Image (cartoon, helix red, strand yellow):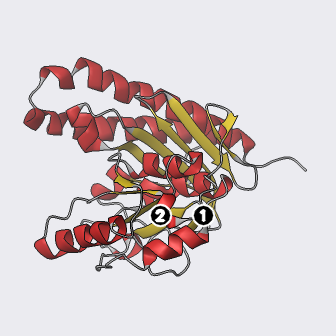
Amino acid sequence: MADPWQSAYDFAVEVARMAGEEVRKAGESEIKVQTKSSAVDLVTKTDERVERIIIGSLKKKFGEGTHCFIGEESVANGQACILTDKPTWIIDPVDGTTNFVHGFPFVAVSIAFAVNKELEFGVVYSCLEDKMYKARRDKGAFCNDEPIQVSDVEEIKKSIIISEHGTDRRQEVVSKIFSSMQRILCIPVHGLRGSGTAATNMCLVATGAVEAFFEIGIHCWDIAAGAVIVKEAGGVLLDVSGGPFDLMSRRMICANNKTIAERIIKEIEIFEVTRDDTQQPKK
């Protein structure tokens, strides 16, 4: 029986690389000559342009109206964020926009594909590093075509944990985020890190560079591709409450094994966020 999604997977890798080149060119040619404040406007334009390139390429390849799309910029501009059973592309054109503005070298293009609400494959191109992470369901995970797998560390005290402080600057939220980090650091663990991009963080778990990544406040386009990559590299994904992973919940922990994940969960102070699929689209 013919593989129905291999061509889509291969094309997603091509499109991710093409999009990454656009991001890299924008950073090299434009941001360096602007102040950091004016560069924020540029990064929005870059986000929008790159998303148009990705979605336009996919529509041209597979036909207008045959697939659905959930993109960061599309949702920001009013499109509903609803995952149906239809073939759906979930796209973050520039994951790590603050990094992009500041020239911090972790910026990724993230493209995932789901059918019947199940993630079939994910591609994350860390374009400034020129690292292409990719995975298909039940077919393993790779970085630059070399197989990758999570670390075999089983003791929390020998682990490195990665997380982010997000964009919500309300005092009560920031307090809970840093309280969680403090509690985890004092387990103790070997260290806490953060690359500034959820997609890259998940790929670092998949390669075994760190043992776990957790965050509350992320979006489905930040983590969809990484979720496939982590799982295919042998890792686990859970809700920060310990329940099943829910792509639309905006809260997640991924880890090299369940023991590490559940130990970290004990220290996380949970705060409420609005689900991606219940936010009202703009009129």
Residue 179 in view here: yes
Q: What residue is pinned by disc 1?
A: 154
Which residue occupies 31% across, 78% down? 269
Tag 2 and tag 1, C-beta contact below 8 Å: no
Q: Position of residue 211 (x, y in %)?
A: 51, 57
The amino acid sitting under disc 1 is Glu
Q: What residue is pinned by disc 2?
A: 157
Compared to 216, does 202 lie above or below?
above
Compared to 261, does 163 lie above or below?
above
Compared to 213, does 63 lie above or below?
above
User: Is 92 positioned to the left or the right of 96 in the image?
Assistant: right
Density class for disc 2 (Cα within 10 Å; few <14, some 14-19, many ≥20) is some
Q: Which mark is residue 195?
A: none
Quadrant for the C terminus in the image: bottom left
User: Is 31 positioned to the left or the right of 199 in the image?
Assistant: left
The amino acid sitting under disc 2 is Lys
**Distance Cα–Cα, label 2 vs label 1:** 9 Å
Depth order, front residue of 35/14: 35
Q: Position of residue 174 (x, y in %)?
A: 18, 68
Which residue occupies 51% across, 63% down? 254
User: Is 125 positioned to the left or the right of 283 in the image?
Assistant: right
Q: Secondary structure at mark 1?
A: loop
Which residue occupies 38% across, 62% down? 219
Q: Position of residue 183 (x, y in %)?
A: 31, 72
Density class for disc 1 (Cα within 10 Å; few <14, some 14-19, many ≥20) is some
